[in-house]
Image (cartoon, grey):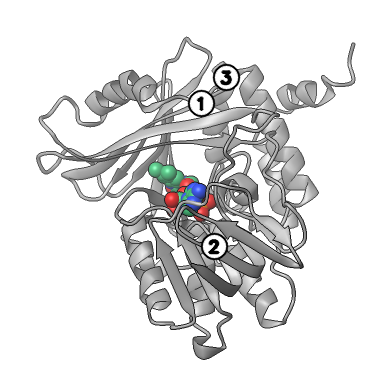
Amino acid sequence: MLTRADLIILGGGCAGLSLAMRLAGWGLDCPRIALIERRVDYGHDRTWSYWRTPGARLTHLAGREWTAVGVTAAGRKVSVDCREMPYQVIASSDFYAEAWRWIRANPRIDCFLGEEVTTPPMREAGEWRVATARGEWRGATIIDTRPPTNDSAVPPRLWQSFSGVEVECPDGTFADHEATLMDFEPDSSGAISFLYLLPYSTGRALVEATMFSPERRSAAEMQPLLARVLARATADRPYQLGRHEHHAIPMGGGEEASSLGEGHVRVGLHAGAARAATGYAFQRTQRWADAAADAAARGRAIPSIARDPWIIRRMDSLFLRVLARAPERAPGLFLRLFARPDPRPVLRFLSDEARPADYLKVMRSLPAGLFLREALRGFLP
Ligand SMILES: Cc1cc2nc3c(=O)[nH]c(=O)nc-3n(C[C@H](O)[C@H](O)[C@H](O)COP(=O)(O)OP(=O)(O)OC[C@H]3O[C@@H](n4cnc5c(N)ncnc54)[C@H](O)[C@@H]3O)c2cc1C
């Protein structure tokens, strides 16, 4: 079976569906698209969170928002009032349903589910060609959202591993007016470990064990930490376990998957979607999808994910170097960052919407000596 299309999208996850749903909105002006995806079922397999800044996209899909988030370390707690930029959460199932509603309504998009692309795309006679066990697709442009098959040669500075479960508890277990961004756990292994908790109601929450460490941690390796934070979050009350999610996101420094040539565009989590210092990728992916659809509308080549501005790359890299070298300082650093009387500069900074003065305010929230020493480390004997 040979299928020809203007645009071949490899992978119908967050990035692939985000672009396809935007182009689907063009109706019959939509380019002819072939979307190839190995899975056949879509469900609530992940939860995307972000701050509802003025530039945030798809906010109508949010299932819940919080106007306060907490950061706790060594018995000290900072409650961040984020009424102006609430912390929101989108269940992936709601995003998938919305994306598929648009895509299925457009006859110019053909979807091939249950198809796994196993060979690298090849360029032949000015066209890209990909194949699965059952078919072959040819087209001018490939949007490749698949993760790389091997870990990159240059490892990321840190991995953000997380394992979470949804729990049902007796009403009154959780304070549902505030999400817990970070509640640090003592860790003697050199990792930075904390509880992340999204209380959907006073009796239901997503409880997540999170770890920043030089190596990625499997779900089994995260289990002891998850058990500890679960016991703490539920105050040892009885609970029923719901769905489970686990993942590890590379944080900075790694070599990102690169393009195979003109017309082959790599995007997604492993191609610049994740912000180095936070791992947040959902809103960045939405911004890319808007830019990609805009380029297509103007007849221009679809871009890859834009590189962060120099200042963000330098600040994120320095922050990650400090965390990697002095993980025991992490709880204090995050407390200081969020303890500012006005949290908006930090929230804009974390959401890629910083104003020029925000960079300075973020820098001034952190201990100058520690960061200066790390910045100078490369130059000192
Ligand atoms: C549990 C979890 C929680 C997360 N929480 C957040 C969060 O709170 N905030 C945030 O910003 N980010 C979060 N992320 C990170 C990121 O936003 C998501 O991973 C996002 O789904 C990445 O989008 P993507 O398109 O790059 O990858 P995916 O959504 O994984 O899409 C890639 C698609 O390619 C398909 N595929 C792969 N290989 C092949 C192949 N060979 N042939 C055909 N199809 C293939 C896969 O089946 C998949 O559907 C989370 C990730 C996970 C896993």
Residue in the picture at 35% in, 44% down: 179
Amino acid type for the residue under numbered disc 3: Pro
Residue 342 appears in the rendering: no
Residue 185: % across, % down: 40, 21
Amino acid type for the residue under numbered disc 2: Glu
Q: Is residue 225 left or right of residue 274?
A: left
Q: Circle 1 — which element?
A: loop
Residue in the picture at 55% in, 42% down: 279
Q: Circle 3 — which element?
A: helix
- Depth check, front residue: 2 or 6: 2
368 w.r.t. 17: above or below: above
Can you identify the residue that label 1 sits on? 216
Residue in the picture at 57% in, 52% down: 268
Can you identify the residue that label 2 sits on? 136
Residue 204: % across, % down: 19, 45
Tell me which corner region of the image, top left, top right, bottom left or bottom right, holds residue 276: top right
Q: Residues within 10 Å of mark 2 (few under 14, many from 20)?
A: some
238 w.r.t. 345: above or below: above
Whichever of callouts 2 and 3 sits on the residue coming sooner in the sequence is: 2
Q: CA distance from mark 2 to mark 3?
A: 49 Å
Amino acid type for the residue under numbered disc 1: Arg
Q: Circle 2 — which element?
A: strand
321 w.r.t. 275: above or below: above
Can you identify the residue that label 3 sits on? 327
Residue 174: % across, % down: 22, 40
- Nearer to us of marks 3 and 1 is 1
Q: Residues within 10 Å of mark 1 (few under 14, many from 20)?
A: many
- Depth check, front residue: 357 or 183: 183
Residue 83 appears in the rendering: yes
